[in-house]
Image (cartoon, rainbow, N blue to C red):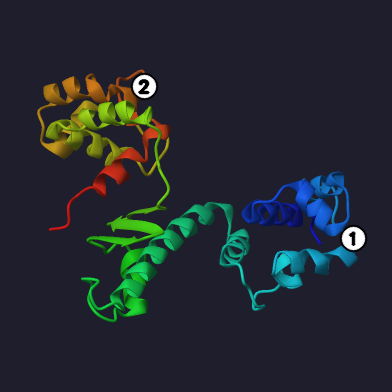
Amino acid sequence: MNAANLGERLLYLRKNKGITQENLAKELGITNQAVSKWESGQCCPDIELIPEIAKFYSISVGELLGVDETGAEDDLIVHIKNELDKKKDSDKYGEILKIAKALHAVMCIEESKKGASGLPPKMDSDETIEHAVNDEWGISVITEPKIRTSMRGGSVFFSGSRRLFMDSDIPKLSKVLKCFADRWALSVFFAIYELTGMDETTYVSCEEIAETTEIPEENVTKIIEGDIKRFLDVNAEKEVRIKDEYMNVAPVLSLLVPIM
């Protein structure tokens, strides 16, 4: 039993259930310090506690230990997490995105079963999921009382119904949207994303942006020195890329394209 791997799994299970170390300790009749040591990988739970922990989280002992691939699993999230743990680090984020795309496709399949959904009736599961995973997707929006999900190309977005912003966020958001109200500014921003988004070390020149957008280079220079400058990193050669904290802006904006 690997203490570090088990500790990570125990931490995830507890966080996913929304309880504190103290809550779990009381449930199992142990100390908070014991739970802390498990989750930090300093030691493993006593063998007699393993079934109790598994029962508390409604999973099998094999799932808890990360060795049961076929056992019954009530918690889909934990199952997905355990599957991701088996992947190489270099593959994990790609798998997460693949799952997100597939989940949107599953939502579409479920909606297609409803007569008034506007989607083709009884969509083929395998074909629909394959199209989504391979980015062979136009645009679709599914709205249910508890969840909204949108997908366009390789961009997918999920949201709940709870309030997403504070009143103080509205002026900030208004300023951001104004930055992209100009068609050329939006074209330049999307071009920078397209040219640099796949490599976190890549910067692009105004000349390259001009070639991609067919906007005159002098206009490109003015645009990147204008309102969108706040979103950009500039290196010593005056080349640019989008700052990491704003890399989500382009995919989110792409989802705003109306369905015709």
What mark, if any, has residue 209 been given in the picture? none
Image quarter of residue 3: bottom right
Tag 2 near tag 1, CB within 8 Å? no
> Would you call the spot at circle 1 few (<14 residues within 10 Å), some (14-19), or many (20 or more)?
few
Q: Is residue 7 toward the left or the right of residue 258 in the image?
A: right
Q: How many marks?
A: 2
Image quarter of residue 83: bottom right
The vertical placement of 139 against 119, above or below, is above
Q: Which residue is mark 1?
A: 46
| Residue drawn 30% across the image and 20% down it | 238
Image quarter of residue 223: top left
> Would you call the spot at circle 2 few (<14 residues within 10 Å), some (14-19), or many (20 or more)?
few
Q: Give residue 139's position: percent from left, percent from top.
A: 23, 59
Q: Return the residue nearer the eye: 53 or 234.
A: 53
Q: Give residue 249's position: percent from left, percent from top.
A: 32, 39
Secondary structure at badge 1 equals: loop
User: Residues under labels 2 and 1: Cα distance?
Assistant: 54 Å
Q: Give residue 167's position: percent from left, percent from top.
A: 37, 31
In the rendered image, the quadrant that contains the C terminus is bottom left
The vertical placement of 206 against 192, above or below, is above
Answer yes or no: is residue 65 visible. no
Question: Of the residues shown, which amino acid type is indicated by label 2?
Answer: Asn
Q: Is residue 140 toward the left or the right of residue 160 in the image?
A: left
Q: Which numbered disc flags the more N-terminal residue, 2 or 1? A: 1
Q: Give residue 232's position: percent from left, percent from top.
A: 33, 26
| Residue drawn 33% across the image and 65% down it | 132
Q: Return the residue nearer the eye: 239 or 170.
A: 170
Question: Of the residues shown, which amino acid type is indicated by label 1?
Answer: Asp
| Residue drawn 67% across the image and 57% down it | 13
| Residue drawn 37% across the image and 68% down it | 107
Secondary structure at badge 2 equals: loop
Q: Which residue is mark 2?
A: 235
